[in-house]
Amino acid sequence: MRFLTVGTVGITVSFVFLYALRGFIGLIPAKIVSYVIAFSVNWALNRSFTFHSENPRKFEEYIKYAFVYIGTGCVDILLFIYLVYHYPILYKHPGGALIIAAAVVAILNYLLAKHYAYRYQKVRL
């Protein structure tokens, strides 16, 4: 449930930046920028709220999280592009495509974040 809460925050951040930027830089670049911003917000929130990470190597963890989200982000962005160019209503209202794409990759993001990005074991002496 916490992952979904964080995901909702991420989608909201992405939605705000998508709509704020699309008139200035275009729809697809705005989607990419909004994804990167939302990714960083999600990392911080998932780290503390969802997975309670105790890994002192935050940068290393951030990079692992980035690899997860680069892969799933490609799926997200390609699906978004497909939807907005094949369904005129979604081009006019891209928030719908943003939500559909996010829902498709949410499960994959959770599993990879939990078992790869936030996987940390304390060394016990």
Image (cartoon, grey):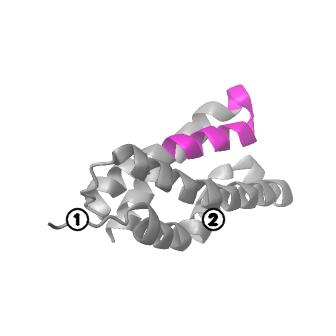
Helix, strand or loop at label 1? It is loop
In the rendered image of this protein, does residue 4 appear above or below residue 26?
below
**Residue type for callout 2:** Ile
The one nearer the camera, 115 or 39, is: 115
**Where's residue 88, x and y in %?**
82, 55
Rendered residue at 66%/44% (across/down): 31
Residue 82, numbered circle? none
Q: Which mark is residue 123?
A: 1
What is the span of residues highlighted in magenta in the rendered image?
A: 23-38
Instruction: Identify the residue at image location x=53%, y=51%.
Output: 66
Say which of marks 1 and 2 sits in front.
Answer: 1
Q: Position of residue 69 (x, y in %)?
A: 56, 56
Q: Which mark is residue 100?
A: 2
36 part of magenta stretch: yes
Disc 1/disc 2 C-alpha distance (Å): 41 Å
Horizontal placement of 27 versus 115: left or right? right
The answer to whether any part of residue 11 appears in the image is no
Q: Secondary structure at mark 2?
A: helix
Q: Main secondary structure of the magenta part?
A: helix
Q: Tag 1: Cα neighbours inside 10 Å, few (<14), some, or many (≥20)?
A: few
Question: Residue 5, can we see it?
Answer: yes
